[in-house]
Image (spheres, rainbow, N blue to C red):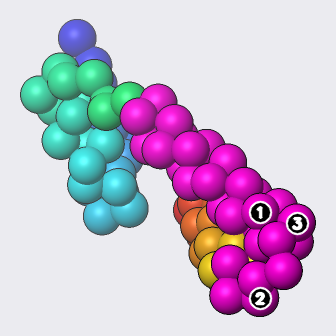
Amino acid sequence: MLSHHDRTELEKIERSLEVSDPDLATALREGKRPRSRALRSTVLIVFDVVAVALLVVGLVLPDPGVTLCGILALTGTVWTHVARHRI
């Protein structure tokens, strides 16, 4: 059995967790495993490969439109990766 002090400390931690990360608190309370990020990572890698391929094709072909699309796609993927790792 926990002492009164231990129970109050655990309640403080629970409230803090509810405020800071409600998804994690819900997952812990319900016993669910957090969602896998493997699918999201795979989709991002596919977009990275497509963006690089667009840029390479645009540089090989004398078409500035494809090169511009490749540059914009790479910029978008870089922003996505930076925003994802900032969290």
Count neighbours of disc 1 (C-alpha within 10 A) and say few if under 14, some if 14 to 19, many if 20 or more.
Answer: some
Q: Which residue is more in the foreground, 61 or 52?
A: 61
| Of the image marks 2 and 1, the number of the one nearer the N terminus | 1
Count neighbours of disc 2 (C-alpha within 10 A) and say few if under 14, some if 14 to 19, many if 20 or more.
Answer: few
Which amino acid is tagged 1? Val
> In terms of secondary structure, what is the magenta stretch mainly?
helix
**Magenta segment: does it hold 1?**
no
Q: Position of residue 60 (x, y in %)?
A: 88, 66
Q: Quadrant of residue 21?
A: bottom left
Mark 2 vs 1: CB contact within 8 A: no
Q: Name the element at disc 1.
A: helix
Q: Quadrant of the N terminus?
A: top left
Q: What residue sits right under mark 2 in the picture?
A: 64
Mark 2 → mark 1, Cα distance in angstroms: 10 Å
Residue at (25%, 43%) from the top-left corner?
25
Q: Position of residue 3 (x, y in %)?
A: 29, 25
Q: What residue sits right under mark 1 in the picture?
A: 57
Q: Name the element at disc 3.
A: helix
Residue at (82%, 71%) from the top-left corner?
61
Residue at (67%, 48%) from the top-left corner?
49
Which disc number belongs to residue 60?
3
Count neighbours of disc 3 (C-alpha within 10 A) and say few if under 14, some if 14 to 19, many if 20 or more.
Answer: few
Q: Position of residue 45 (x, y in %)?
A: 61, 44
Which amino acid is tagged 3? Val
Q: Which residue is more in the foreground, 69 or 33?
A: 69
Q: Position of residue 83 (x, y in %)?
A: 60, 69
Give, as a single range, the part of the protein colored magenta: 38-66
Look at the picture and state if 15 lies above or below 37.
below
Q: Quadrant of the C terminus?
A: bottom right
Mark 3 → mark 1, Cα distance in angstroms: 5 Å
| Relative side of 3 to 77, left or right | left
Q: Quadrant of residue 74?
A: bottom right
